[in-house]
Image (cartoon, rainbow, N blue to C red):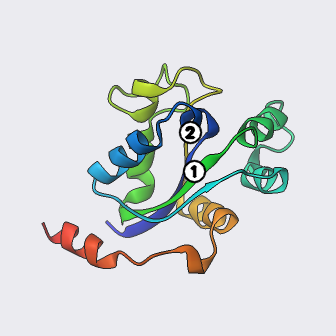
Amino acid sequence: MATERTLILVKPDAVSRGLIGEIVARIERRGYVVSAMKLMQLDGGRAREHYAEHKGKAFFDDLVTFITSAPLVALAVEGEGAIDGCRQLIGATNPLDAAPGSIRADLAQTIGRNLVHGSDSAASAQRELAIFFEDKDFVSRRHDLERWIKE
């Protein structure tokens, strides 16, 4: 399995509930490495770019309004199989359908307030990471990854 980088967003509902640490801890306990992190207030332009695949859908405006309503935390997460592994850790979009032990099953309340976003493919990860981070934002932690892979 290849080392990948993916985008994880700790959404405004999670930030307001004080769950940043819990979510980051779960990601790190799974063995993934955070290589970039920003606490930020997302503007409408970036939000629309991030959710571009949903443009024209009935819920698009609600997505943009919610994600720009309060601060969020953007994370670049690296590790072997990080895209699928983080998606599994996050759980299904609807918390009622999420696997027990996943972030959404354990902590989320509704589909509209499901705490976390994770890129769903390598192409999405590349596109989404570019919306939130510049190359200078990433800190190399390859030595950590290499050490953990060997263990």
Task: Note whether residue 88 is visible.
Answer: no
Instruction: Residue at 51%, 74% (x, y): give it.
Output: 138
**Mark 1, secondary structure of its residue:** strand
**Residue found farthest to the left:** 151
Picture quarter with the N terminus = bottom left
Q: Which residue is mark 1?
A: 73
Picture quarter with the C terminus = bottom left
In the displayed structure image, the side of residue 121 where residue 70 appears, left or right? right
Instruction: Residue at 55%, 26% (x, y): give it.
Output: 94
- Kind of residue sitting beneath label 1: Val
User: Residue 48: image x %, image y %?
Assistant: 81, 50
* Front-lying residue, 75 or 41: 41
**Mark 2, secondary structure of its residue:** helix
Badge 2: how crowded within 10 Å, few (<14), some, or many (20+)?
some
Instruction: Residue at 34%, 47% (x, y): give it.
Output: 25
Badge 1: how crowded within 10 Å, few (<14), some, or many (20+)?
many
Which comes sooner in the sequence, label 1 or label 2? 2
* Front-lying residue, 130 or 87: 130
Q: Which residue is mark 2?
A: 15
